Amino acid sequence: MTARQADRGAQNWTLAGSILASSLAFVDGSVTNVALPAIKADLQTGAVGLQWVVNAYLLPLSALLLLGGALGDRFGRRRMFLGGIVLFAIASVACALAPSLGVLLAGRIVQGVGAAMLMPNSLALLGGAFDGEARGRAIGTWAAAGAIAGALGPLAGGWLVQTVGWRAIFYVNLPLAAGALLIGWFKVAEKREDILRAIDWAGVAIATLALGAITWGLTTAGGDHPQPALGGAVVGGGLLAFILFVWLEKHRGDDAIMPLAMFGTKSFAGLTLLTFLLYAALGGLFVVLPYMLIENQGYSPTQAGAALLPLPAVLGISGRIMGGVAGRIGPRLPLTIGPAIVAIGFALMIRVTPEASYWTSTLPALLVISIGMAGAVAPLTTAVMASVDGDHVGTANGFNSAVARTGGLIATALLGSVLAAKGDDLTNAFHLAALAASAAAAAGAALAALLLLRADEIKTDQKAEGI
């Protein structure tokens, strides 16, 4: 075997391990959504309880992704990658065996911690194994595979909910975890210099407090028994904590968990805003669309999961191609056109009603959303990795993933009125949510056009800012 063949083999193993591990987080972020009606009936919970089944996972994932990336930069990305897989698998078993809502939520929290450890380091290992256009193609493959896993999850989960019970959806994680752990242990190597930096524990604590307060406040303001005054006060406290977090990060400089120097280029700032808006829209869709189909259109969990299949089909075909395209022409054009198409798809969701056919209402809207996301997912990831130096790849990946999950977290916290509604009220609330998602995606497209740089401007901008 030649050295080139050996390198290619190591790259392929790293890609396979990254895909399997990341699929844990992507699958669990979507498979639970088709089980929400079954969990609601079995554990006798309301809209607020269902919101926390989703957000108990997203909250630690959002808050700790930065820490997971920073710990990987300091102590070793492979080490954090493997530790996250093990923790996620243990928590999945706890969720499957949970006798009450409280225990289920505790298990979901630990799952979020494990995902926060493995996700940024999975992508950082992948970024270290590939260079140039090959990196773009690899990231495109990773993004497409993750999206496929995330969207196939509801189909497999729906079938399990219908035939075995909702608890079985958490056992799906175990073979994925076993495969990722074996590949990571025996086949994945790490190419990096030792990086010794202080960990910004105060920043992590304040960021977690801020996100938790904002999420709890938004959830309290809606749901079955809304308390808008209390919810607004808690959200206000969370925003003050966030301001304190930004102030602290500014004074910690390069030792910050979220170095503000990363925002020195307008491209990175634009990518951050685009990520939040696009994934808030998508995260909300994956919660409310299956719920709407099951509750208002009489779909079985399996049918509701199958209804989402256009998304993985389109992403699977185009993800690798778009990763390579972004590597050649830069992210600006794909990240402007893609979210604009997504906005059109969400607007088409207002045609989804209890009487409408799937083939003439839900399917066309999903196809348009899928085409738009195919143009955005891989270029977005590639652009983020290209915007920072090699030593901060883990931190940048963690930050961008945190922004994406935070978008889904905030969107879910705002969906209490949808999950609490029934009949025509549910349809109307779903349409309002779809229009809000369309507006968010359109705003993301506008930001990409205004703030992102062309391919020939990126290096000049980075050089000027010292990146």
Image: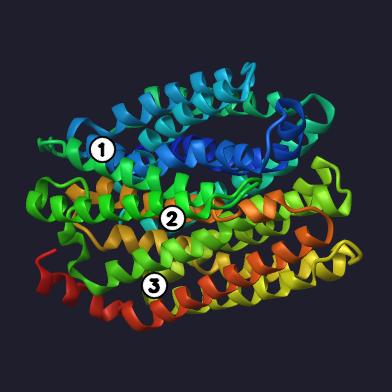
Q: What's under tag 3, amino acid-wise?
A: Pro
Q: Secondary structure at mark 3?
A: loop
Q: How many marks?
A: 3
- Residue with the mark numbered 2: 232
Q: Residues within 10 Å of mark 1 (few under 14, many from 20)?
A: few
Q: Residue furthest front?
A: 229
| x and y percentages locating residue 139 in the rendered image | 43, 54
> Could you say which is closer to the camera, residue 195 or residue 356?
356
Residues at marks 1 and 2, CA–CA distance in whole angstroms: 22 Å
Q: Residues within 10 Å of mark 3 (few under 14, many from 20)?
A: many
Q: Nearer the viewer, mark 1 or mark 2?
A: 2
Which of disc 2 and disc 1 is earlier in sequence? 1
Which of disc 1 and disc 3 is earlier in sequence? 1
Q: Residues within 10 Å of mark 2 (few under 14, many from 20)?
A: some
| x and y percentages locating residue 349 in the rendered image | 72, 69
- Residue with the mark numbered 3: 331
User: Does residue 7 appear in this view?
Assistant: no
- Residue with the mark numbered 1: 205
Residues at marks 2 and 3, CA–CA distance in whole angstroms: 37 Å
